[in-house]
Amino acid sequence: MGAVPSCESRRDGATCSGRPSAAAAMLERIKASLPSLAPAEQRVGALVLADPRAFANLPVSILSDRAHVSKPTVVRFCRSMGYDGLSDFKLKLAGNVSEGVPFIHRSVDADDKINDVMVKVIDNTVAAFLKYRNDARPLAMEKAVEILAATYKTGRRIEFWGAGNSGIVAQDAQHKFFRLGVNAIAYSDGHMHVMSASMLGPGDCVVIVSNSGRTRDLMDACDIARRNGATTIVLTASGTPLASSGQIHLAADHPEGFDRYSPMVSRLLHLLVIDILATGVALRIGGSTLQPRLEAMKNNLRSKRYS
């Protein structure tokens, strides 16, 4: 008898428990519905079944050409399957794609028209967000929020570190936490990372953002901060050296390579995680404390704007 495929290698769309995955169930329902559809809609359904990944990412013009139908027919098929339209169908398809039908990042090509660029960038981002929602580890996020809120309450330092593109994310994080009244600062220079790490101590917290998870300066500074007693939270991809260097790992996994000339999905995914952290900390600070501060800030900023 042949060996039973592992969960990672199964092609039948089943999960480890033997139940069909959400993607497999959605595709099975489409397959079962084909005989009841009009011939033109059947061709659209066959296109979905032939390559779900491509269907979730291609614009309607290409989908209609490949199925040899009109654009409205593609939309009618989606509605016949019980969805609000093409956008809703593609979002559900991309969100359900997991075991057996993995999402594949579609890079922008040099000869892409602006419409293709728009579709690829938006679809890649939406699919990455949905995948993160499905794969997120709430326990690690909860622990990170608790540590950051506790650091705020004791008045200790919260720092955000990043290099290059991740340095911009660190600055955005500092801005968000600063508005909450948190004693926060961001550094994007390797020398500053090491110098600041040397000054941190017990009760302080540093959030380290890295797309590659292999930046030497960040890893060295992380080790120094941890040895000095500060809590280290790392926001990076799983399986990287930095992921195992911090005390709390917030996984930000995506199919986009860190060597891309313009890493778009990774930056937006990191910004999303920062938003979740800031929102969690804001809720723990409490509206009675935070709302008066934000209202006063808003009133004071009015003089900086044209009426």
Image (cartoon, rainbow, N blue to C red):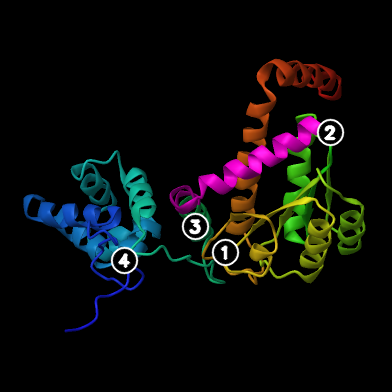
The mark that comes first in sequence, 1 or 3, is 3
Nearest to the eye among marks 1 and 2: give it.
2
From the viewer's perspective, tell me whether residue 290 is left or right of residue 73: right
What residue does disc 4 label?
A: 100
From the viewer's perspective, tell me whether residue 192 is left or right of residue 81: right
C-alpha span from label 1 to label 2:
31 Å
Q: Which residues are magenta?
A: 129-155
The mark that comes first in sequence, 3 or 2, is 3
What residue does disc 3 label?
A: 124
Quarter-of-image position of residue 66: bottom left
What residue does disc 1 label?
A: 238
What residue does disc 2 label?
A: 155
Residue kind at label 2, given as amino acid type: Gly
Q: Residue at x 49, y 59 (%)?
A: 120
Membership of 145 in magenta stretch: yes
The mark that comes first in sequence, 4 or 3, is 4
Question: Which quadrant: the C terminus?
Answer: top right
- Whether residues under marks 4 and 3 lie with C-beta atoms below 8 angstroms apart, the answer is no
Q: Residue at x 31, y 60 (%)?
A: 63
Residue kind at label 1, given as amino acid type: Ser
